[in-house]
Image: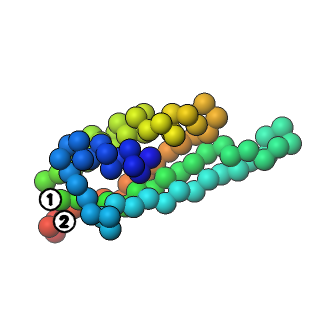
Amino acid sequence: MLGTLNGALEVRGITLAPDAIAASATGVNELVNNMVRLTSIQVRYRLTIPAGTREAVDRALSRHQEKCPTATSLAAAVAISWTADITEQGAA
């Protein structure tokens, strides 16, 4: 999903340095019918964005999961959610 988000930002003219975009993911395994299954993934993004780009970043975030091949492949079996911690450069 990080690659898809980065691509969505670049399409909008927002190129982030490698240290300005990161993600961590946590998976939840549960016992389902006596079998351990991955049931959910929570992705947490950390973005440092240029001043004045928040609206475009929010649009990219709102659409990136539905455009991600991995997320759409897993969607029927695994609940995927995300949050984003966003810092805008130059913001007080």
Q: Residues within 10 Å of mark 1 (few under 14, many from 20)?
A: few
Q: Secondary structure at mark 1?
A: loop
Whole-percent x, y for residue 3 in the image = 39, 49
Q: Is residue 16 left or right of residue 62?
A: left
Q: Is residue 84 left or right of residue 58?
A: right
Q: Mark 2 — residue?
A: 89
Q: Mark number for residue 20?
A: none
Q: Is residue 55 left or right of residue 66?
A: left
Residue 87: quadrant of the picture: bottom left
Amino acid marked by disc 2: Gln
Q: Disc 2 and disc 1: Cα gap in Å?
A: 5 Å
Residue at x-position 49% and y-position 60%: 24
Q: Is residue 85 left or right of residue 78?
A: left
Q: Mark 1 — residue?
A: 51
Whole-percent x, y for residue 26 in the image = 57, 56
- Rendered view: 48 above or below 66: below
